[in-house]
Image (tube, helix red, strand yellow):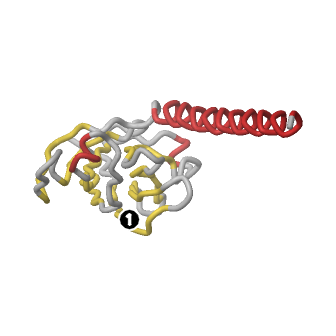
Amino acid sequence: MFNMMSHNKRSVGLKTNRSAAVFACLFALASLFMVTSASLANGEQIGEVRTKFKVLGANDKIVIEAFDDPDIPGATCYLSRAKTGGISGSIGLAEDTSDASLACRQTGKITLPENIRSGKEDGERVFRKSTSILFKTMQVVRFYDEKRHTLIYLTYSNKLVDGSPKNAVSAIPIIENWK
C-alpha cells in the first residue's frame, strides 16, 4: 500500500512538471512572438464593413488596414481581411478565416537599402497580425525583382503547424523621379 501511494505521488509530480514545462514552452513562444513583432510595421485601421449580423457580440466584418514598409519609406500596403465576430470574436477567441486582399503603392520617393536591392532580404516579413489565439497569423512578406526594379508583397496565413494556400500578391514598380 505504501509503495502504491509513493508511485501515485510520483505520477502526480511528473504530471505537474510536464504541465509546467508545457507552460514554460508556450510562454517562451509567446515572448519570441512579441519580440519579433516589435520590428514589424503596425497596421492602421482605415475602415471596416459588416458582412454578417450577430445577435450576441460583434458582427463579422472585413477590416481594411494600411501599413508602411518599415525598411522602405515611400512603400505603403493596404490589406483587407476577414474578422470573425460573435461572442468568441469579441473576446479574442475566434479564429479568423484566411481570406485577404492586398494592394501596395508607391506613396513617396523610394530608395532601396543595399540589403534589399541585393536580394538578401527576399521573403522578409514586414507585417503580421494575429488572427487567432492559437498561433495563427496573417502576414505580408517582401521580395525585390531586380530585373523589373519592382517590389513584390505577398500575404498569406499560417498556423504553428500548417497554413493556408490562400494568398494575394501586389507589386510596386519603383518610379525613380517621384514628385
Residue 145 x, y percent position in the rendering: 46, 59
Horizontal relation, residue 109 to residue 32: left or right = left
The answer to which of 135 and 114 lies nearer the viewer is 135
Residue 32 x, y percent position in the rendering: 56, 34
Residue 144 x, y percent position in the rendering: 46, 55
Residue, x 54% and y 47% (percent of image)? 121
Q: Quadrant of the C terminus?
A: top left
The answer to which of 156 and 19 lies nearer the viewer is 19
Whether residue 90 is situated above or below residue 34 in the rendered picture: below
Q: Secondary structure at mark 1?
A: strand
Mark 1: few, some, or many residues within 10 Å (few <14, many ≥20)? some
Horizontal relation, residue 110 to residue 33: left or right = left
Figure label count: 1
Q: Which residue is mark 1?
A: 167
Residue, x 34% and y 35% (percent of image)? 42
Residue, x 72% and y 33% (percent of image)? 17
Would residue 150 be seen by someone viewing this image from the given angle? no
